[in-house]
Image (spheres, rainbow, N blue to C red):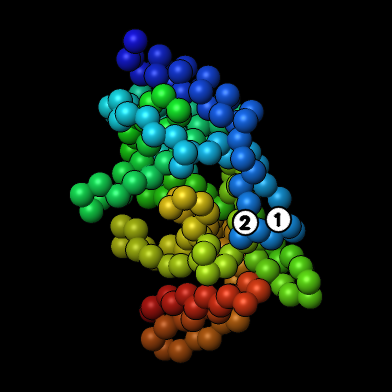
């Protein structure tokens, strides 16, 4: 089996396409009001770790392969559907996973980017629904929290999408979320409270 980077990408693409055609729908807490996209049953696949490849998801969400940016959005969307993460020796590691192989990749910050947010009503309650640039939809909840954490000295907002994969909430999207929440400002800190159904998230920005 050839193991050049291009050959690995080709095999991953073929396996991801097969997996997507027979995928399970990605249900968000069983709620019927969310949109979904096909996500293969990655948890059921147990392939061997077949090494690493020169593919990096940068902190701004761009995918780079062997020093060049991947510009075919459909291919990036496909590969993002087989993203997999594991804790190895206390470190978060990322892979592209198919039924036959698991290839390690590099992720600078979060592997996904949330680019849209809206309030949706379901059974008389308002929920926050976010969409990633790859087409994942997620409703904020206790299982899919919105949090603030530090990256290179900057506090940034994130939402947990699926399978341990976090999405950085894009700056413009976060500004939109701010308009849906309640701000409390003091000399030392700014607190943003966001509510989604029964869940509540308090995000703190100091200074």
**Which quadrant: the C terminus?**
bottom left
**Which quadrant: the N terminus?**
top left
Dot label at residue 102: none
Q: Are marks 2 and 1 in contact (CB under 8 Å)?
A: yes
| Residue depicted at 64% across the width and 43% down the height | 25
Sequence order check, earlier mark of 2 and 1: 2
| Residue depicted at 58% across the width and 65% down the height | 140
Secondary structure under the numbered disc 2 in the rendered image: loop
Q: Is residue 79 visible?
A: yes
Name the residue nearer the viewer: 42 or 14.
Answer: 42
Seen in the image, is 90 located left or right of residue 158? Answer: left
Q: Position of residue 6 (x, y in %)?
A: 40, 16
Dot label at residue 34: 1
Seen in the image, is 163 located left or right of residue 117? Answer: left
Assess disc 2: are there few (<14), some (14-19) or many (≥20) residues with their C-alpha within 10 Å of its C-alpha: many
Q: How many marks?
A: 2
Secondary structure under the numbered disc 1 in the rendered image: loop
Judge whether 120 appears above or below 197 on screen.
above
């Amino acid at each position: 089996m050839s193991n050049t980077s291009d050959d690995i990408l080709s095999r991953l693409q073929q396996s991801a396409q097969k997996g997507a055609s027979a995928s399970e729908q990605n249900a968000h807490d069983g709620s019927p009001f969310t949109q979904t996209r096909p996500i293969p049953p990655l948890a059921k696949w147990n392939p061997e770790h077949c090494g690493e490849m020169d593919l990096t998801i940068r902190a701004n969400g761009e995918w780079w392969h062997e020093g060049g940016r991947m510009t075919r959005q459909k291919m990036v969307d496909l590969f993002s559907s087989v993203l997999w993460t594991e804790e190895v020796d206390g470190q978060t590691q990322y892979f592209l996973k198919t039924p036959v192989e698991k290839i390690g990749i590099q992720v600078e910050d979060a592997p996904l980017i949330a680019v849209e947010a809206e309030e949706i009503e379901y059974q008389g309650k308002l929920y926050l629904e976010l969409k990633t640039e790859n087409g994942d939809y997620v409703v904020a909840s206790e299982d899919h929290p919105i949090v603030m954490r530090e990256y290179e000295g900057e506090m940034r907002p994130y939402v947990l999408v699926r399978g341990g994969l976090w999405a950085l909430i894009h700056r413009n999207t976060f500004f939109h979320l701010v308009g849906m929440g309640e701000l409390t400002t003091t000399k030392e800190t700014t607190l943003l409270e966001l509510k989604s159904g029964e869940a509540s998230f308090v995000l703190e920005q100091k200074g």
